[in-house]
Amino acid sequence: MSVTLHTDLGDIKIELLCELIPKASENFLALCASGYYNDCVIHRNIKGFMVQMGDPEGTGKGGTSIWGRKFEDEFHETLKHSTRGIVSMANSGPDTNGSQFFITYARQPHLDMKYTIFGKVIDGWDTLDDLEKVPVHEKNYRPLSDIFIRRITIHANPLAA
């Protein structure tokens, strides 16, 4: 499965790791399908590190899973924050996944086995580059001008049998 995030700066296509990370993938896809992320602001953007989104309140403190509660981490030994474009659940500690997620701008090995990786960027690298260049507030890393996920398109996996 893959999805396309349609942002104010352009599109980012993400391949989801549904077989390796089923619970986080199910949560993300269901939230996408329900329109949960529509008009959701990108609330944290740290050059060289990551861009974070998925809180409908826009504060970085909100959001919930499809189950109405936080859910457990899922780790797989082959999944690492080893490159630009890794998509992971944001959390506030072990087993606190909700709706927020982030995309890495570079290799971040210190995040391995602490944040559930459930996808990777497969297209829209120019949009990710543009996001990384957006000016932000020095103290909270929020973009100076709001940037939104306007909607998300869910695609069937063309490689599936």
Image (cartoon, helix red, strand yellow):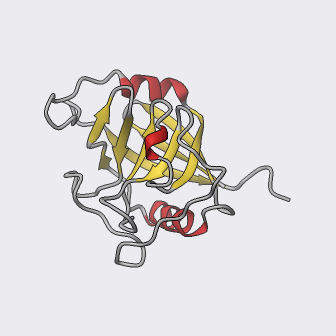
Q: Point out the image quarter for the C terminus.
A: bottom right
* Residue 128 appears left or right of 38: right
Q: Relative to 100, say whether 24 is above or below.
A: below
Give residue 57's position: percent from left, percent from top: 22, 57
How many numbered discs, if any?
0
Classify residue 105 by image quadrant.
top left
Q: Relative to 126, say whether 79 is above or below.
A: below
The residue furthest left is 139
The residue furthest right is 161
Classify residue 149 by image quadrant.
top left
Give residue 35's position: percent from left, percent from top: 41, 61
Q: Relative to 97, say whether 12 is above or below.
A: above
> 12 or 142, which is in the foreground?
142
Residue pictured at 49% horizontal, 67% vertical? 27
Give residue 150's position: percent from left, percent from top: 38, 46
* Residue 1 appears left or right of 161: left
Residue pictured at 49% horizontal, 57% vertical? 116
Give residue 133's position: percent from left, percent from top: 34, 21
Residue pictured at 38% horizontal, 28% vertical? 131
> 147 or 132, which is in the foreground?
132
Q: Point out the image quarter for the N terminus.
A: bottom right
* Residue 73 appears left or right of 63: right
